[in-house]
Amino acid sequence: MKIKSSVILLTLSLLTQGVFAQNISDEIAKYREMIADGNPSELYAAAGEELWVKPSGPKQATLQQCDLGKGPGEVKGAFAELPRYFKDTNRVQDLESRLMTCMENLQGIAASDVIKDPFGKGLRKDIEAVVAYVVTESKDLPIKVVPKHPKEKEMAQIGEKIFFYQAGPMDFACAT
């Protein structure tokens, strides 16, 4: 523990003296230059857009009829208004759970098949890419989640409790 804290103190000392500052500034400048023409995440969102229109699953259907709350197929601004209550499922759903509902209903892909895959693999990777696409379509739009339905209000209250719940060895909450 003593060695670890000594290394941290030495590193902080050197940083404050500017020894690493030039190298860090140079590396940040190189990174900014690399992504100047676009962010690498845009490739992931583009893959999601392709999956949105690609027929998939046992029903060989697209997600273009998926209603994310703004009407079938409408993705512009949808993420900025989620989570919300959906009458067809009688549930408050976030983007991921709503996409799984659409995949199940439209394409015939069971939600359990998506969930069983590890992060970044199989169907889970596909849904992650579609999420990136839908989120990108809400870029720069204000978040406007206003609980109106009783189930939305209930979920907001649960979320608030979770946000302020203190736990762990330091008794921290998300609010901390």
Image (cartoon, rainbow, N blue to C red):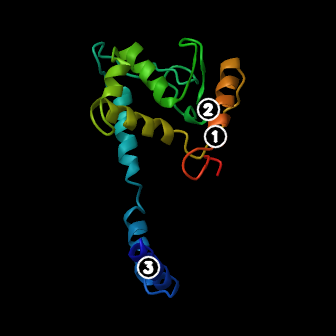
Horizontal arrangement in the rendering, residue 102 relative to residue 85 (left or right): left
Q: Which residue is mark 3?
A: 6
Going from N to C along the chain, the mark reached first, 2 or 1, is 2
Quadrant location, the N terminus? bottom left
Task: Residue 127 in the image: state x and y as whole percent.
Answer: 38, 32
Residue shown at the point (59%, 13%) measured from the top left: 87
Q: Secondary structure at mark 2?
A: helix
Q: Amino acid at mark 2?
A: Glu
Does the image show residue 31? yes
Going from N to C along the chain, the mark reached first, 2 or 3, is 3
Q: Amino acid at mark 3?
A: Ser
Viewer-side label of 2, 3: 3
Residue shown at the point (54%, 11%) measured from the top left: 88
- Say few, some or many: other residues with alpha carbon within 10 Å of mark 1 (under 14 / 14 to 19 / 20 or more): some
Q: Which mark is residue 165?
A: 1
The CA span between labels 2 and 3 is 48 Å
The CA span between labels 2 and 1 is 25 Å
- Say few, some or many: other residues with alpha carbon within 10 Å of mark 3 (under 14 / 14 to 19 / 20 or more): few
Viewer-side label of 2, 1: 1
Mark 2 and mark 3 residues within 8 Å of each other at the beta carbon = no
Residue shown at the point (59%, 31%) measured from the top left: 82
Q: Secondary structure at mark 1?
A: loop
Task: Residue 79 in the image: state x and y as whole percent.
Answer: 55, 34
The CA span between labels 1 and 3 is 34 Å
